[in-house]
């Protein structure tokens, strides 16, 4: 087992994390006009967790997850609470780099670093760590996390989601997962427990879909940076409080929409954000887009829209139908680039572009992430057929390239404005 970090290393890393988070929060709250009043709940939540060293306020046991493929309904039904541990911190990215190579994805490095720095605290709180095996880097991360002393449960993801073989394989994986959970929490999975969890999560997803529909309106009553903040807070907040706070935000946005309120410039280039997920405090590129006059009116990332877009659907509310229905929800509609065919992903992206009247796409990839780096070519080719411009940006969590990226984003937004004038 790897030696635990020194108290000095823990203190230094957490201090730098607090500085990162404080800088991002300041930009989000102070550099933009007319933030929705109901966003105060979410701003305060981040301030409590990241700046005031607050703890995760949950009464039930916690289960860590590192991907949208972890079946949350089953975790809730087993009496635990899923907490997504993906990190967007450059400080944690540097801590995680001690275990990996120089070319490892920022998200993987930061997540490993976060678990390393907070290991003693997390081991006391987390019953297990669920790691869906979505890429080779996450596969190797499993061994690193086990060496750090975590009880890691890998979830094998099929490489193809469209075949019956893949569907049966994934259903078997989820069924095995459901059989293990009661041994972890001591609570038996029941039909009513699973159904109640489905209803709870579907309610949260319904509110988030309402939020994304408001964002796609013309004019948009809320900026994309706030939508990312709401989505990221779902990672760790109490789901009932989160859903209630989001319902309150949606009610405010409904009033804004009725009055014709515009959160940004009415002539701003309307952007769809795609690719690697923006995770707090690394909202570097989304913030640049909106600071420079663009407006993110849609996205397809797994820290926002894909996190909460699809609901569980079932015909019969019995135990042996509910679990396959949950499994299908996490596979069939998923538009992740891990699958060998990404036609469904591109189709959904094009549909979203049309619904939200998108002018251009900004596609983010983290340095070292082969999935998004390779996939951007097929996405770019598909967008060209519909005459949709795309800016590809490869970066990591470090702030040093902000100036260079800012220049490219500004030029991209200006080119969109020029196109709109010509039309």
Image (tube, helix red, strand yellow):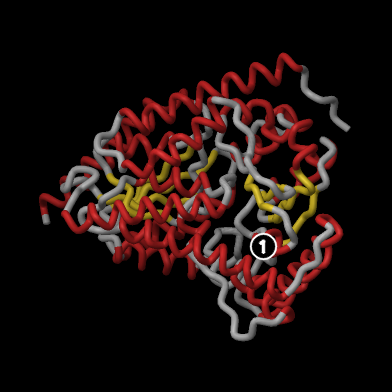
Q: Residue furthest front?
A: 59
Q: Is residue 420 above or below residue 179?
A: above
Q: Position of residue 310 (x, y in %)?
A: 51, 67
Q: Is residue 103 visible?
A: no
Q: Position of residue 154 (x, y in %)?
A: 77, 55
Q: Residues within 10 Å of mark 1 (few under 14, many from 20)?
A: many
Q: Position of residue 195 (x, y in %)?
A: 64, 72
Q: Quadrant of the C terminus?
A: bottom left
Residue closest to the eye, 197 or 228: 197
Residue closest to the eye, 227 or 330: 227
Q: Residue at x 50, y 59 (%)?
A: 306
Q: Is residue 207 above or below residue 136?
A: below
- Please, what secondary structure does the residue beneath circle 1 have? loop
Residue closest to the eye, 324 or 243: 243
Q: Quadrant of residue 323?
A: bottom right
Q: Residue at x 75, y 32 (%)?
A: 121
Q: Is residue 335 visible?
A: yes
Q: Quadrant of the N terminus?
A: top right
Residue closest to the eye, 229 or 350: 229
Q: Residue furthest top?
A: 8
Q: Is residue 207 left or right of residue 190?
A: left
Q: Is residue 187 above or below residue 129?
A: below
Q: Is residue 229 left or right of residue 421?
A: right
Q: Is residue 35 left or right of residue 15?
A: left
Circle 1 residue: 71
Q: Residue at x 39, y 38 (%)?
A: 40
Q: Residue at x 69, y 69 (%)?
A: 193
């Amino acid at each position: 087992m790897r030696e635990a970090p020194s108290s000095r290393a823990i203190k230094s890393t957490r201090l730098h994390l607090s500085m990162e988070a404080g800088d991002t929060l300041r930009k989000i709250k102070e550099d933009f006009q007319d933030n929705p009043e109901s966003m105060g709940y979410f701003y305060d939540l981040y301030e409590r967790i990241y700046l005031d060293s607050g703890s995760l306020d949950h009464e039930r046991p916690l289960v860590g997850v590192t991907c949208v493929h972890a079946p949350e309904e089953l975790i809730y039904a087993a009496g635990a609470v899923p907490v997504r541990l993906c990190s967007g911190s450059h400080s944690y990215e540097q801590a995680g780099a001690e275990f990996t190579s120089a070319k490892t994805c920022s998200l993987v490095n930061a997540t490993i670093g976060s678990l390393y720095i907070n290991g003693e605290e997390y081991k006391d709180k987390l019953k297990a760590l669920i790691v869906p095996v979505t890429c080779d880097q996450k596969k190797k991360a499993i061994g690193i996390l086990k060496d750090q002393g975590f009880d890691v449960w890998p979830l094998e993801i099929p490489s193809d989601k469209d075949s019956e073989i893949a569907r049966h394989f994934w259903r078997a994986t989820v069924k095995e997962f459901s059989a293990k959970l009661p041994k972890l929490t001591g609570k038996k999975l029941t039909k009513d427990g699973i159904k109640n969890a489905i209803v709870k999560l579907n309610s949260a997803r319904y509110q988030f879909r309402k939020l994304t529909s408001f964002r796609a309106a013309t004019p948009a009553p809320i900026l994309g940076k706030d939508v990312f903040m709401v989505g990221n807070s779902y990672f760790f907040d109490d789901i009932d409080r989160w859903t209630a706070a989001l319902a309150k935000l949606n009610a405010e946005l409904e009033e804004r929409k009725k009055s014709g309120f515009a959160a940004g410039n009415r002539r701003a280039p309307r952007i769809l954000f795609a690719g690697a997920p923006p995770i707090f405090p690394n909202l570097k590129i989304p913030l640049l887009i909106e600071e420079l006059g663009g407006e993110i009116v849609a996205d397809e990332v797994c820290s926002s829209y894909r996190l909460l877009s699809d609901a569980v659907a079932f015909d019969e509310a019995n135990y042996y139908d509910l679990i396959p229905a949950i499994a299908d929800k996490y596979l069939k509609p998923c538009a992740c680039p891990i699958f060998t065919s990404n036609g469904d992903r591109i189709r959904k992206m094009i549909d979203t572009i049309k619904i939200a009247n998108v002018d251009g796409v900004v596609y983010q990839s983290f340095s070292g992430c082969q999935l998004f780096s390779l996939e951007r070519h097929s996405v770019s080719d598909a967008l060209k057929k519909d005459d949709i411009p795309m800016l590809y940006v490869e970066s990591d969590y470090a702030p040093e390239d902000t100036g260079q990226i800012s220049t490219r984003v500004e030029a991209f937004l200006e080119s969109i404005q020029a196109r709109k004038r010509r039309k």
